[in-house]
Structure formats: C-alpha cells, structure tokens
Image (cartoon, rainbow, N blue to C red):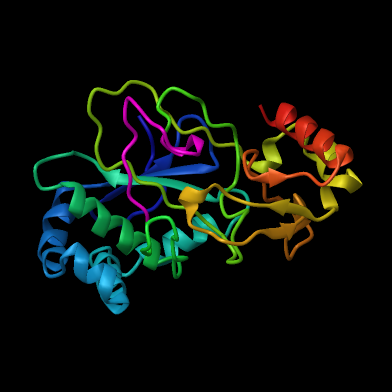
C-alpha cells in the first residue's frame, strides 16, 4: 500500500518503491476517457507540422488535471532532491494506442518546456523500434547489449535539461529496464568531479545516424547555478584528445558502472 502525495482528482501520485527521488503518477481511466476527445482533434502529423497544436493538447491535459499538472511536473523536475517521475495510464486498454501515447508524451513535455529538434528523426521527437537484429551504428537500437549509464545531449549545441522516454509498444520482449542514477547518490562523485581533467574541454561527436554534421567541445563536469556538480557524458561519443583524457574517461566509466 502507498499513500497518495498530492490530491489531483483522477491521478494517483506516490513515491517509487526503489527511490524517494522518483514519483509515480498513474492516470485513472476517467482521465483517459476525457483526453480522448481533445487528443482526437489533432492527428500526429498535425502535431509534427504545426508546433502550436502541441501546446493546445498540453493545455487540455493541464485543464483536465484541475490546472495542477504543469506545476506538479515542474516542481518535481526542478527540485534536485527529486528530478524524475514515471507517468502512464493505470490500465492499458484499446483506448491507449501508440498515437495516443505520442500525444500524451507531447502534452507532458510541453507543460515542462520546448523540446529540442531531433536531427535523427527530423522532428520534435524521435520514434524507433528495437528489434531482434540490428546493424545500426550506435547502442540505441541493440536489443542484447547493455547501455552504460550516460546523459543525453553531449554532442549537440542545444542545451538538454530533461529527457522524456516513452515505451509505446512491447512484443516478445523480456528485460530492457531503465537504469537511473541520481548524481548525488553516486559514491564516486566527489573523487571524479574534483579531478581537474574532468573540467577540461573534451571533443564530442556522434555516429552518422544522428545526422549531426559538427562536433562540440565541453567538459564532462561543470556546476549548476547553485554550485552543485553536473555531468554531461556519453561513453560512445567522447573523443579524448590525449592519453590523459582517455584514462580519465576509462576511470569515469568504471566508476559509473
């Protein structure tokens, strides 16, 4: 049993059983029923071609939640003590198909901010399949290889503040769980973030499938506005300039895993 943290009619909100930093938000059937009509007004193509429609369905979600959902999302994400929530329908049914979930993800993300353009998909979001066989040039679509802990946005010029991931469909799959680590819970944080090498500029590139034709430079570790450490790191995309940087990245990778 769990105790609801906040009373928003039609939503069940409680701490995740593995971490008090993560909040679970379950959407009751009555809310799904009320979202069907405003969501049906816009095809996914319309959301892709006309950016203002994305804010329209975001407002629909917030209005149905008594105007409280936008504040809830932002209070979780902008608080370093939490920073993460898991949200979805309490009961999956025929009413909740892949397109509905794309619209729901769009509504959620636009109550938080304006999404970066995804060069890989050429849209404001990316949608792809992970299949039994894969010949891509990154770990992203490989079903049987673990992805090491990483942050997103290391190789693009835009700033990446938060990430929304949605599982739209699952068939004949086992495992594949998402691993999350809050930086403040990492036992090696002080050792690594105080290493002067981690504050040097590193080169970050990306494979051809990402459709980014430039490279960027930035350190692995920096500080947020309150002086707290923050990290920007993907093992596959870091291009060390020398032995010193290469060995630091190896040390970082070992400590994360």
Q: Is residue 174 magenta?
A: no
Residue 151, x across and y down, in percent: 59, 46
In this orientation, which residue lies closer to the viewer: 145 or 205? 205
Task: Give the residue at x 41% y 33%.
Answer: 135
Q: Quadrant of the C terminus?
A: top right
Drawn side of residue 139 relative to residue 166, left or right:
right
Q: Give coordinates of residue 197: x percent, y percent.
A: 88, 46
Which sits in the foreground, 133 or 58?
133
Examine the structure image and report whether residue 130 is included in the region drawn in magenta: yes
Relative to 105, 210 lies left or right: right
Tell which of 73 and 199 is nearer to you. 199
User: Where is 168 relative to 202, above or below?
Assistant: above
Image side of residue 199 versus residue 257, left or right: right
Horizontal and vertical percent for residue 239? 72, 45
Residue 119 visible in the shown view: yes
Q: Give residue 208's position: percent from left, percent from top.
A: 51, 50
- What's the magenta bit mostly, secondary-structure-wise? loop
Quarter of the image for residue 143 reads top left
Q: Which residues are magenta?
A: 126-141
Task: Examine the image and state in which quarter residue 227 appears.
Answer: bottom right
Give the quarter of the figure containing the N terminus.
Answer: top left
């Amino acid at each position: 049993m769990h105790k609801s943290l906040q009373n928003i009619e039609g939503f069940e909100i409680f701490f995740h059983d593995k971490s008090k930093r993560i909040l679970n938000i379950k959407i009751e059937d009555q809310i799904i029923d009320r979202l069907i009509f405003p969501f049906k007004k816009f095809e996914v193509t319309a959301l892709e071609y006309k950016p203002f429609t994305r804010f329209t369905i975001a407002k629909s979600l917030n209005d149905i939640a008594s105007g409280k959902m936008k504040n809830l999302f932002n209070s979780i994400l902008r608080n370093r003590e939490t920073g993460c929530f898991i949200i979805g329908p309490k009961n999956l049914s025929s009413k909740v198909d892949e397109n509905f979930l794309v619209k729901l993800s769009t509504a959620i993300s636009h109550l938080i901010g304006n999404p970066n353009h995804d060069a890989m998909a050429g849209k404001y979001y990316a949608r792809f399949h992970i299949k039994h066989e894969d010949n891509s040039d990154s770990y992203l679509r490989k079903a049987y290889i673990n992805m090491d802990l990483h942050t997103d946005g290391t190789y693009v010029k835009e700033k990446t503040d938060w990430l929304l991931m949605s599982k739209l469909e699952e068939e004949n799959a086992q495992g594949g769980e998402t691993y999350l680590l809050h930086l403040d819970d990492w036992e090696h944080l002080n050792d690594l973030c105080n290493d002067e090498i981690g504050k040097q500029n590193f080169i970050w590139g990306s494979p051809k499938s990402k459709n980014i034709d430039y490279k960027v430079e930035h350190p692995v570790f920096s500080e947020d506005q309150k002086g707290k450490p923050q990290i920007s790191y993907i093992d596959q995309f870091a291009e060390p300039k020398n032995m010193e940087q290469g060995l630091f990245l190896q040390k970082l990778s070992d400590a994360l895993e």
